[in-house]
Structure formats: C-alpha cells, structure tokens
Image (cartoon, grey):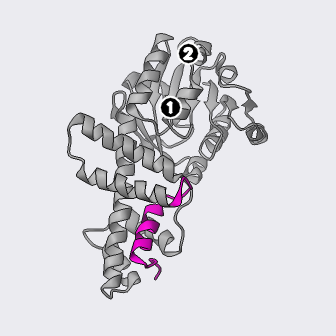
Amino acid sequence: MTSRIALVGAGRMGTPLCGRFVSAGHVVAACDLRPEREAVVRALGAEWASSVETAATGADALVTVVPGPDEAAAALPDAVFAALAPGAVWIDMTSNAPARAGELRQRAGAHGVDVLEAPMGGSPADAEQGRLRLFVGGPADVLDRCRPLLEAVTTPDRIRHMGGPGTGYTAKLLINLLWFGQAAATAEALLLGHRAGIDLTALHDTLADSAAGSDFIRRDLPSLFAGDYLRSYGLDRIHDQLRVITEQAHDLGTPHEMADTVLRIHRQALERFGPVDGELLAVALLEEIAGTLLRP
C-alpha cells in the first residue's frame, strides 16, 4: 500500500532512505534546513517541501532522520503533528535521548499520532543498500502496522523490537557505548603490546582469533591501521550520546564506572580536536599521549 511520507532530514542517512522509500512506491515529501539539498531530493523522485509543516501536511507517516535530540525537538512543534493525516504515525530514526524523545511522544499522542522509535545502526552505504539495523521501541501493534515502511529500508531480520517506548533509543546508545569503549580499550592494548615489542600485525591477528576478539578488531581495526579515523560522524555527537547513556545509568542506579571512563576519554578528545568528524579520534588522542601511531 502506498503511503505519503514526510521525511525530515536529507543528510548522509536521510538521503539514501529517501531513495529507498521512493523506490518502494511511496510518495515522499522531504525537507532539510539546507536548501541546497533540494536538487538531490528531486533527483531521487521525491517532492521538496520548504518546511517541516508543509511536508507533514496530509502525510500518513512522519519520518525524522536528524543529527540528535536538539534538532528533533526544534523540527517538531505541535503544528507539525497537527498537520499529519488522521491515524498517522511518527517514526523517529534519530539517535535520540529517551527522556527528550518522551516529551515529543506525549505531544504527538495529544494529536492522535502513534509513535515508533527506530534508531539506526549502520553507514550511509548500508542505508543505500537496505541493510541497516533498526532498534525499535514502541507498541507491537504500531510496529506491525509500520513494517511495510521499515522493510523498504532494511530486511525483516534486521528489525529488532526491543520493547516499549525508550528501549530502542537505549539499545542504540548501549551499542555505541560498547563500541567506543572497545575501540579505546583495544587501542590501549595495542599501544602496550607494541611498546613491549610485539608486531602489530601479529597482535591484531592473534586478538582477532582469541577470546578477546570482537567485530571492532576484525572489521574496523584495519581502517585505523591504514590511518583512517572513520570520519563519518561528529566527535561532539559521539560525546553527547555517551553522556546521555551515562546519565541514564546514574538515574537508574546501575554501575557506570566504565561508562564514565569512556565518556571522559571522548570528552578529552573533543577538547583536543574539536567538534570534527572522526569516530576513532579518541584512539588518536591515546596515540598522541603514547607518542606512537598504530600503523603496522
């Protein structure tokens, strides 16, 4: 069934998602704060809207793909939810903060709009090729209703229902916490091993094939060895997400010593390098402190 989709955010992730929605036969009206994105959006076969409210007018689904909580809150005044078609749904694919998104969820509900969170795991290439991982939070019946839309951008096995509202956001933030923590811990181990006289290539191969092996070591570490700090996401965004999940641990009364450490390292990296793109810039900071680059 064809749906009219209002897509908010035509950036690195929103643009390939826009193309996949159009290819699946949906009518898409996209908007972005950058007017220069209009040509790209139209080239994909979507309509261009001058504002979020214009895009949302009469839409069956509102899909937000924006950088973070502040952008989501700024893009979604009450008028946007009021402009949607009766029985519409808001699908938030942003890496949002559970508490901040909860405020928006209440406002959407006041206008009769159902809400589903589906933050993404993956790269722009994954989005283009339909292999994103979606961490879904919200009512099961709303998920069932939205599956045709979600399956336009990924395969059914990559859609994970984590539970009720907030659980999808939390799952994504936990994955980020563990990945960035693994990156820092692995860098420390490699710097120590290298200083102790172990060849980096031999150490990489040994770790990858050991009980300490991880996707980071097997898949991402070769990029670092080649001098690529994965400049596809902002260090300031990474820091903000780590802060949100650490604060959530504090609020829920669970231990967060490791999370505090990961956050502190990334705060120091942000102070050192500024709000630039680089998912492995915390590793660059550790290399700088050690006076050694991790290059085989």
Amino acid carrying mark 1 in the image: Asp
Question: Which disc, if any, is residue 92?
Answer: 1
Task: Please name the residue shown 40% across and 69% down the image.
Answer: 286
Instruction: Name the residue that disc number 2 marks.
Output: 78
Question: Which disc, if any, is residue 33?
Answer: none
Q: Position of residue 239 (x, y in %)?
A: 43, 49
Q: Quadrant of residue 186?
A: bottom left
Q: Nearer the viewer, residue 133 or 250?
A: 250
Amino acid carrying mark 2 in the image: Asp
Q: Is residue 144 visible in the rendered structure shown here?
A: no
Residue found at the very far front of the displayed protein: 271
Task: Please name the residue shown 79% across and 40% down the image.
Answer: 39
Q: Nearer the viewer, residue 261 or 28?
A: 261
Q: Is residue 26 visible in the rendered structure shown here?
A: yes
**Mark 2: few, some, or many residues within 10 Å (few <14, many ≥20)?**
some
Task: Please name the residue shown 33% across and 28% down the image.
Answer: 164
Q: Is residue 47 above or below residue 182?
A: above
Q: Position of residue 192 (x, y in %)?
A: 31, 78
Q: Position of residue 31 (x, y in %)?
A: 68, 31
SS assignment at label 1: strand
Q: Which residues are magenta?
A: 273-296
Image quarter where the N terminus lies is top right
Marks 1 and 2 sit apart, C-alpha to C-alpha, by 16 Å
- Between disc 1 and disc 2, the foreground one is 2
SS assignment at label 2: helix
Q: Is residue 117 above or below residue 80?
A: below
Is residue 244 on the magenta stretch?
no
